Image (cartoon, grey):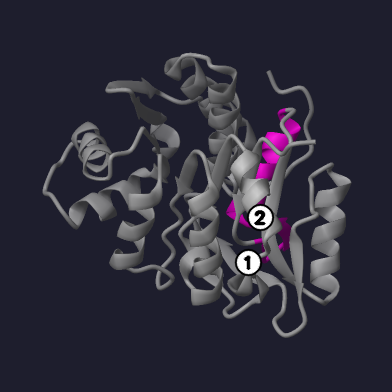
């Protein structure tokens, strides 16, 4: 069965003071796509350790295709130490190097990626040359390329981010990342102007920007759509942006109007904020 979306990059444990939970932006997106009835696959790499086994068991147990989880005999499974402040904002400390820094090219990836409707990738996967080179080969095969920016200092550079933007068709980022990146090139103040600028500069088909409690915006085909978001009782914000992207792609694959896709994505992101962890159990999200 064809995988309609392929996600590339990190899989790891988010380690909170209260315990460790499975995560990593690409696999979180895939998890939510699976919950929404899609058939995604993930290209990533784990260590030959207990944490790697737990991640395989967790995601396969949720019905996610883990056939392309490579196993590394040198480096450990990814970990990130997460701390939330009183505003529910989370700071991350990534362990490096880890297994997902060394994703190896396999010839079967050309067909896997080439048959998918969307190929989702992030900026963290480009922090190490090995995974970055594999990513670039996948991008050559991909049909529609979705860049889910994830700027975590010190794991990015202006040069690499520009390179990734130049290879993308659809961009998803948060408002802080939008301001940082557009600040490299322009002094535009409004969010709308910044979105249009980055879309034009990198010839993007679409730009989606999440703004936390202020909602989200989507610029596609020269039309700007906005959504004020949903007022929810926040448990934690981990994975909300990943759920948002999954909801957006799922609706775009259905061919619905951009405004409807944005509303659905915002509703799903808001729902995940009411749950503990990036990959909570849920069914039949409408």
User: Would you say residue 242 sits in the magenta stretch?
Assistant: no
Q: What secondary structure is marked by label 1?
A: loop
**Residue in front for this viewpoint, 208 or 200:** 200
What residue appears at the point 86 percent right and 66 percent down from the top-left corner?
53
Let me know if residue 29 appears in the view: no
Quadrant containing the N terminus is top right
Residue 38 in picture, x, y percent from top left: 71, 31
Q: Please report contact status of discs 2 and 1: CB closer than 8 Å, yes or no.
A: yes
Q: How many marks?
A: 2
Residue 278 badge: none
- Is residue 73 shown left or right of residue 163? right
**Quarter occupied by residue 96:** bottom right
What residue appears at the point 68 percent right and 38 percent down from the top-left corner?
32
Residue 236 in picture, x, y percent from top left: 60, 46
Residue 259 in picture, x, y percent from top left: 43, 17
Q: Is residue 181 above or below residue 261?
A: below
What residue appears at the point 51 percent right and 28 percent down from the top-left corner?
266
- Is residue 61 shown left or right of residue 164? right
User: Would you say residue 23 sits in the magenta stretch?
Assistant: yes
Residue 109 badge: 2
Q: Residues within 10 Å of mark 1 (few under 14, many from 20)?
A: some
Q: What secondary structure is marked by label 2?
A: helix
Let me know if residue 35 appears in the view: yes
- Is residue 270 shown left or right of residue 275? left
Distance Cα–Cα, label 2 vs label 1: 7 Å
Q: Which residues are magenta?
A: 11-36
**Residue in front for this viewpoint, 155 or 88:** 155
């Amino acid at each position: 069965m064809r995988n309609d979306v392929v996600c590339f990059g990190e899989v790891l444990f988010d380690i909170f003071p209260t315990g460790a939970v499975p995560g990593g932006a690409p696999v979180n997106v895939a998890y939510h796509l699976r919950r929404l009835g899609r058939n995604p696959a993930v290209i990533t790499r784990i260590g030959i350790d207990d944490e790697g086994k737990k991640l395989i068991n967790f995601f396969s147990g949720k019905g996610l295709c883990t056939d392309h989880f490579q196993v590394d005999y040198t480096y450990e499974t990814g970990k990130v130490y997460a701390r939330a402040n009183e505003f529910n904002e989370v700071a991350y400390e990534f362990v490096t190097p880890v297994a997902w820094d060394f994703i190896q090219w396999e010839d079967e990836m050309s067909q896997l990626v080439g048959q998918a409707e969307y190929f989702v990738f992030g900026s963290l996967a480009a922090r190490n040359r090995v995974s970055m080179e594999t990513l670039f080969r996948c991008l050559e095969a991909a049909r529609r390329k979705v860049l889910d920016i994830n700027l975590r200092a010190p794991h990015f550079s202006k040069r690499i981010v520009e390179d990734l933007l130049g290879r993308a068709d659809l961009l998803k980022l948060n408002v802080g990342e939008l301001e940082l990146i557009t600040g490299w090139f322009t002094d535009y103040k409004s969010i709308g102007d910044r979105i249009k600028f980055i879309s034009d500069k990198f010839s993007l088909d679409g730009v989606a920007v999440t703004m936390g409690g202020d909602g989200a915006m989507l610029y596609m085909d020269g039309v700007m759509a906005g959504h004020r978001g949903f007022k929810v009782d926040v448990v934690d914000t981990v994975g909300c942006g990943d759920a948002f992207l999954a909801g957006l792609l799922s609706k775009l694959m259905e061919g619905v109007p951009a405004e409807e896709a944005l509303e659905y994505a915002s509703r799903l992101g808001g729902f995940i904020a009411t749950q503990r962890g990036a990959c909570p159990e849920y069914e039949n999200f409408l």
